[in-house]
Amino acid sequence: MNPIIVLLQYKIYANVQIYQFLLLVWVLGIIWNLIKWIRAIQITKDMYKRIENHSEHYHISDFIDNYQEENYVVLRTNYVSSPMVMGFNKTILIPDVCLSQENLKNVLLHETWHIKNHDVCTKQIINLLVIMYWWFIPVYRLRDKIDLFLEMRVDNQTTNPFSKEEIMKYMHTLIEIQKNIQSKNEFKGQSTHFMIQDNAHVLEYRINYLIDGMYRKKTSKILMIVVLTLPLLTNSIILESEFDSPNSKEIYDQSDIDKGYIIKHKNGTYELVLGKARFKISNPNDDCFKDVPIIKE
């Protein structure tokens, strides 16, 4: 720890130390990313209004017979190439392309669960976490894994009442939508990361999960205990710099000296006595000894 402390306290300019410079860079990075995030939200709102004014308006019940759940608005538009929920609007956007009745049903059910789960809010919380710790590389990995988890949860919720044949059709829908994304230019703009959509890697994992199992894997209880106790254990360990203990000459101050006394030996030498400690002195008339009594041997 000592070399690290010395390095962080090294002055690089005037009285500015390295750790102060690093903190400044951290804060500036947060401010910069926060500005980009706020701007992206505004762009999303503006783009949504534009899409809303230039699209065909429907409801889920217009596409699914005997639909009994909350009847969200559906916008058919050529501004997007894949189904999505944009921003915090409880509206489903679908591309203006020819989709079979089965595929359209799967798409709407999928996006409906995203709205019910408030997945957009979850993503924004993760975005704020990334903004706060923008320099910590694993946080980007965490964001990707959260995205994957949200999609897998929706897949499970959507296909839960399905038969095996319907699950296969659902997987076919995912593949068809992915082909549609790759065959067109994706919606451009800084608001893209606010949309719930797929990428090839996420889709591959989701398809494999649906094919492999249609079953749930349970995490080992021992592993869960370790994961839960690890944060507690790491906070119980504190790393600090080690410094050499001060020697005996450095542990006394003037108040300690005033409580002692000086012995004048027969040979003319002087010795200061502080408790059990004794120190030879050359000049008993020094100012620091003016209140110390002198005892002759």
Image: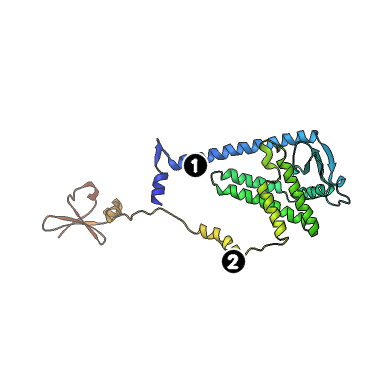
Q: Quadrant of the C terminus?
A: bottom left
Is residue 115 toward the left or the right of residue 129 in the image?
A: right
Residue 49 lies, with reference to residue 6, above or below; the image says above
Mark 1 residue type: Leu
Would residue 132 be visible to someone looking at this image?
A: yes
Is residue 211 toward the left or the right of residue 103 in the image?
A: left
Crowding near pointer 1: few (<14 within 10 Å), some, many (20+)?
few
Crowding near pointer 2: few (<14 within 10 Å), some, many (20+)?
few
Element assignment for label 1: helix
User: Residue at point 62% right, 36% down?
Assistant: 36
Q: Which mark is residue 260?
A: none
| Residue 204, image x, y percentages | 68, 51
Residue 67 lies, with reference to residue 164, above or below; the image says above
Asked if the residue at tag 1 contacts the one at tag 2, i.e. Cβ–Cβ closer than 8 Å, the answer is no
Mark 2 residue type: Ile
Residue 102 lies, with reference to residue 75, above or below; the image says below
| Mark 2, residue position | 222
User: Residue at point 25% right, 57% down?
Assistant: 260
Mark nearest the camera among 2 and 1 is: 2
User: Residue at point 23% right, 50% down?
Assistant: 289
Element assignment for label 2: helix
Viewer-side residue, 132 vs 53: 53
| Mark 1, residue position | 23
User: Residue at point 67% right, 62% down?
Assistant: 217
Would residue 87 be visible to someone looking at this image?
A: no
| Residue 172, image x, y percentages | 76, 51
Viewer-side residue, 244 vs 226: 226
| Residue 252, image x, y percentages | 29, 54
> Farthest residue in the left direction?
267
- Marks 2/1: CA–CA distance: 38 Å
Sequence-wise, the earlier of marks 2 and 1 is 1
